[in-house]
Image: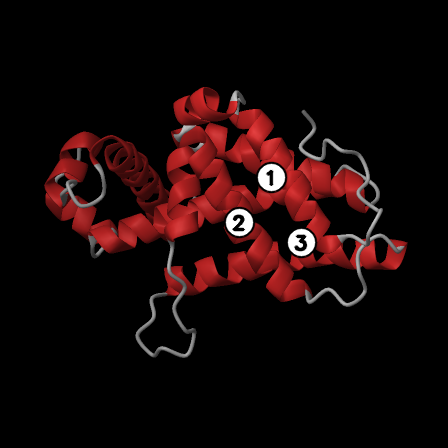
Amino acid sequence: MDRATRKETISALHQENILSAAEQLFTEKGIDATTMDDIARSAQYSKRTVYLQFPSKEEIHDRIVLKGFLELKEHIVQSLRGNEGFFLKYRALCSSLMAFYEASPFLFSRIVDFQTQPLDSLDLPQVKRDIFNVGEEINAALGEMVWLGIAEGTVMPSTRIKESILIYWSSLSALIILANRKSSYISETMGRTPAELLEYGCNLLLRMLVKEGEHGDETPAGH
């Protein structure tokens, strides 16, 4: 290993340690309450070392969000790849998003809350451009699923794919967060579990896309 490669490897290790410590602190204390001093202390680095790797707390946050987007993309791509036909892919997608939240509620919530900025901004950091691009890759994968449904004759051919994906994502992601945070309320007032509410929500969203009478299996969430 030459000197430059060794330096890059060490830097990558430092960054990984800092991001891991920051994610834990953000989860426990909240982003606003976490300082760069907190991150340095938790990662067992000097504050100077942290600033050498990341110029700001915002940069650290965005790198964590990028990690979340990449993990979400992998979840979605794997769930769609392993199933044939629109309905099976849709069921797998619902289950995948729910599983991702259960595994990483903090990352899921940061993805939902992340505000995309115009790519033509001259001072837009590269990490924000990377987040945007990964988000578009996820949208492309979901778009292929909808196109498959149209080709099969189950999804309405008039479906406006990009708009439908945005509505689907915003609706289901908000429902996943609500169902997990309001589990006691759902149980007491509806007599349902969060999983049952999410299953029902997935069925309602499915009807947004498919032709009348083409609802497939009534348990798209796989429950």
Location of residue 79 in the rendering, given as x and y in whole percent from the top left corner: 68, 38
Amino acid type of the residue that numbered disc 2 sits on in the rendered structure:
Ser
At 44% across and 37% down in the image, what residue appears? 177
Q: Earlier in the sequence, mark 1 or mark 3?
A: 3
Mark 2 neighbour density, 10 Å: few (under 14) some (14–19) many (20 or more): some
Image disc number at residue 119: none
Q: Which label was assigned to residue 201?
A: 1
Q: CA distance from mark 1 to mark 2?
A: 9 Å
Mark in the foreground, 1 or 3: 1
Residue 223, image x, y percentages: 67, 24
Q: What residue does disc 2 label? A: 171
Q: Are marks 1 and 2 in contact (CB under 8 Å)?
A: yes
Task: Judge from the rendering whether residue 144 lies leftward or rightward of residue 107; answer left or right.
Answer: right
For residue 162, above or below residue 5: below
Horizontal placement of 132 versus 32: left or right? right
Q: Residues within 10 Å of mark 3 (few under 14, many from 20)?
A: many
Residue behind mark 3: 142
Q: Which residue is painted at 44% across and 45% down in the image?
A: 67
Which residue ends up furthest to the front in the rendered image?
189
Out of 48 and 146, give the one closest to the viewer.
146
Name the colouring of the figure. Answer: secondary structure
Q: Quadrant of the N terminus?
A: top left
Is residue 5 visible in the rendered image? The answer is no
Pair 3/2: label in front: 2
Give the residue type that dot 1 points to. Gly
**x and y percent of residue 131 in the render?**
45, 58
Give the image location of residue 83, x and y in percent: 79, 38
Task: Name the image quarter holding residue 38.
Answer: top left
Q: Label 1: state its secondary structure.
A: helix
At 73% from the left edge and 64% from the top edge, which residue is drawn?
A: 159
